[in-house]
Amino acid sequence: MTITTRLLLIACLVLPFAACKKEEAPQKVEQAPLTKPAGEEIDAWQAYVTDVVKRNMAGLNTSPYIYFLTGESSADFQGEYDRMLEKVETDLTRGIVEGNMLAFASPASAKMADIASTAFSSVDPGSMNGVRVLFIGDAADSARVEAAVKPTGATYTFVEAK
């Protein structure tokens, strides 16, 4: 009799939980892509660049290297340009491991293209296989960045800033 009573008690305790309907997880709604900021405001540009980079991270699990150069109207633009060029050249000289992304963006697209094409010109051919390079800028600047990146073996992706 005790076994039957215990089984009934267990059934009474388990039955309400088994009958509960699990709540479905809310479906993730895809946000519309951000648009290119009209001016050179750094916060707006950084939000835009972050959005574009996230949308191009498919298949990558590491944090990307994001190189962002402020607009040409900033107080110390030439100093920022020189420091950015030095940083990119140093990073590329050290080597970038397969599965990483390098993203280049700036309100001054032509200047960022100068940095990318100059820095990649010193990289050994075929040394960046499995690396993704993302250039966010004007279509007029894409071809020369792509020409500098292709010999390295990296996968080049261009997103027109619009």
Image (cartoon, rainbow, N blue to C red):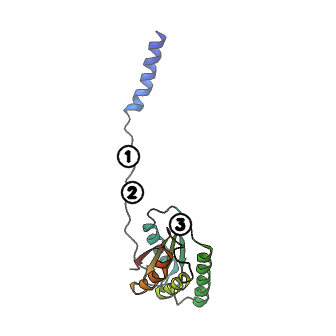
Q: Earlier in the sequence, mark 3 or mark 1?
A: 1
Foreground of the two, 130 or 160: 130
Q: Could you say whether the residue bearing mark 1 is in a helix, strand or loop?
A: loop
Q: Estimate how packed mark 2 is, as few (under 14), some (14 to 19) or many (20 or more) residues with alpha carbons within 10 Å.
A: few
Distance from disc 3 to disc 1, alpha carbons, whole Å, reads 38 Å
**Is residue 46 depicted above or below 11 in this figure?**
below
Q: Which residue is mark 1?
A: 24
Amino acid type, mark 2: Lys
State the quadrant of the C terminus: bottom left
The image shows residue 24 at horizontal and vertical percentages of 37, 46
Depicted 17 relative to depicted 87: above or below: above
Classed neighbour count for the residue bearing mark 1: other residues with Cα under 10 Å, few (<14), some (14–19), many (≥20): few
**Badge 3 or badge 2: first in the primary sequence:** 2
Dot 2 lies on which element? loop
Q: Residue at x 37, y 38 (%)?
A: 21
Q: Residue pushed farthest front? A: 125
Q: CA distance from mark 2 to mark 1?
A: 12 Å
Crowding near the residue tagged with mark 3, few <14, some 14–19, many ≥20 C-alpha atoms within 10 Å? some
Q: Residue at x 38, y 65 (%)?
A: 31
Residue occupying the point 45% across, 83% down = 147
Please state the horizontal and vertical placement of residue 27, each as a whole percent of the image: 37, 54
Cα separation between marks 3 and 2: 30 Å
Element type at mark 3: loop
What is the x, y in percent for residue 114?
Answer: 51, 87
Residue under pointer 3: 98
Tell me the mark number nearer the camera, choosing from 3 and 1: 3
What residue is pinned by disc 2? 28
Residue type at numbered disc 1: Glu
Front-most of residues 80 and 87: 87
* Residue 101 x/y as whole percent: 51, 70
